[in-house]
Image (tube, helix red, strand yellow):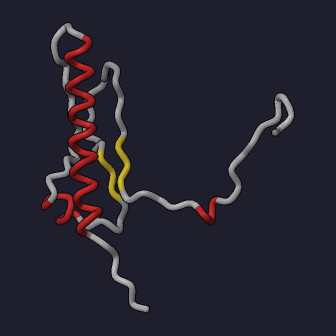
């Protein structure tokens, strides 16, 4: 166990694996309009695959109703839906080994 107040830091970055997708999600108010994409794919994932699996890349804004449960449910359903699409793409798109 580390000493009380000690700080632990991950140092073995060479053993880490990057995931080919990143989702930036913010469950708050958006004050400034933006055209920035919210689903980011690494350069290893061709745009044609993202389109074929219908993975959204555009900013999604949902203002919903005054009910917090409605907004939260919509947010979670959309995140889970995108996650399933990415999972399907990753299942089908396996890198080839030339060894």
**Image quadrant of residue 88?**
bottom left
Left or right: residue 72 compared with residue 44:
left
Q: Is residue 75 above or below residue 82?
A: above
Left or right: residue 37 compared with residue 2:
left
Residue, x 30% and y 23% (percent of image)?
Answer: 30
Residue, x 16% and y 12% (percent of image)?
Answer: 65
How many discs mark residues in the rendered view? 0
Residue, x 19% and y 17% (percent of image)?
Answer: 70
Give the farthest residue toward the top.
66
Q: Position of residue 45 (x, y in %)?
A: 30, 65
Left or right: residue 69 compared with residue 24:
left
Q: Is residue 3 above or below residue 84?
A: above
Residue closest to the eye, 2 or 19:
2
Give the farthest residue toward the front.
1
Q: Position of residue 27 (x, y in %)?
A: 34, 24
Q: Position of residue 85 (x, y in %)?
A: 21, 51
Residue, x 27% and y 30% (percent of image)?
Answer: 76
**Where, quadrant-wise, is the C terminus in this rendering?**
bottom left
Residue closest to the eye, 15 or 26:
15
**Image quadrant of residue 51?**
bottom left
Q: Position of residue 26 (x, y in %)?
A: 36, 29
Give the farthest residue toward the right.
3
**Where, quadrant-wise, is the N terminus in this rendering?**
top right
Q: Is residue 11 above or below residue 29?
A: below
């Amino acid at each position: 166990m580390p000493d009380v107040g000690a700080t632990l830091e991950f140092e073995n970055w060479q053993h880490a694996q990057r995931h080919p997708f990143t989702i930036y999600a913010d469950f708050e108010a958006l004050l400034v309009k933006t055209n920035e994409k919210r689903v980011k794919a690494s350069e290893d994932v061709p745009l044609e695959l993202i389109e074929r699996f219908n993975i959204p890349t555009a900013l999604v804004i949902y203002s919903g109703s005054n009910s917090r449960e409605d907004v939260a449910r919509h947010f979670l359903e959309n995140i889970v839906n995108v996650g399933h699409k990415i999972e399907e793409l990753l299942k089908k798109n396996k890198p080839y080994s030339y060894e």
